[in-house]
Amino acid sequence: MLRLYTELGAKLCSIEMCLKCTRLKYTLPDRIREKLASGPGLQEFISHVEEPDVKDWSNYEGKLKREKDSERLHLPPWLKTKIPTGNNFSRIKDQLRTLNLHTVCEEARCPNIGECWGGGIHGTATATIMLLGDTCTRGCRFCSVKTSRAPPPPDPSEPVNTATAIASWGLDYIVLTSVDRDDLPDGGSNHFAETVKEIKKQKSSIMVECLVPDFAGDMEAVKTIVNSGLDVFAHNIETVEGLTPYVRDRRAKYRQSLAVLKEAKNINLM
């Protein structure tokens, strides 16, 4: 009986300690929250970050061994990505949201988004527009774009919205690309071509590069793009033939990509 009471008392003490710990867990964030409320904000932190001097990069010597009192090795300054900020970045982001446009910069999680949208050293901001939505029907292993067998239908106002945005950026060269749309009869080629025509209509001086998918080998779709009024036709093979089945989606074939490039060249020579 004595042993039973002793064990029961120990359990009660254990429960009491747990309750105290639980109360401590709930009160601790409150104190931290007060400190955060009165402390510096994110923008103040960003504004005080010292930029690395580009002229010193040629003399930079990386450390291959961790120092005795150091917790970890640090990346060289030219491998560190800045937090995207600035008027150009905010302007482009807001405009893309307003017009419901998508970019490779965001969908593919490009680390250089701050350079392109912010204007870089030249001060001219740009973005690579991704047409036909933000969801691809294929799933290549190297790509971060969302995938689905049945993506939402293309936005019919996208060609006009894209041209409006690009014309306002004051560029002389723009790159258009798109997701693969194997669910569409023409692979989205007519939508792509309509966007090019609308851009030329709003600003004829701008050069337009179209980085297109393979359209599942449909040469009529390739012809539609080539005859749209573009200035540069581009298509990525991505890798060598032997690695294609392992890197790209099974519907993306190496010889098929070569055939697309060959057809585009032949049409251009006519």
Image (tube, rainbow, N blue to C red):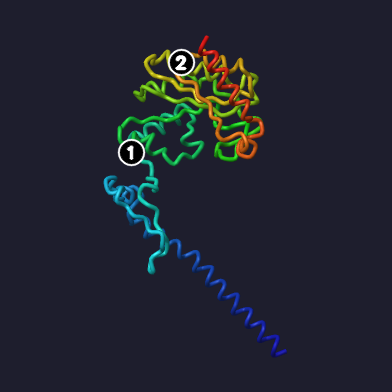
Q: Distance between the residues labelled 1 and 2?
A: 29 Å
Which of the two labelled residues, at mark 1 and mark 2, occupies the earlier sequence position? 1
Question: Could you say which quadrant of the image residue 33 lies in?
Answer: bottom left
- The percent position of residue 116, horizontal first and vertical second, equals 38, 34
Q: Which mark is residue 86?
A: 1
Amino acid, disc 1: Gly
- The percent position of residue 159, horizontal first and vertical second, equals 49, 19
- Left or right: residue 244 versus residue 39 is right
Identify which residue is drawn at 54% across, 68% down: 22
- Numbered disc total: 2
Q: Nearer the viewer, residue 53 or 161?
A: 53
Question: Could you say which quadrant of the image residue 19 lies in?
Answer: bottom right
Question: Could you say which quadrant of the image residue 254 lies in?
Answer: top right
- Left or right: residue 122 versus residue 116 is left
Identify which residue is drawn at 54% across, 24% down: 212
| Residue for badge 2 | 198
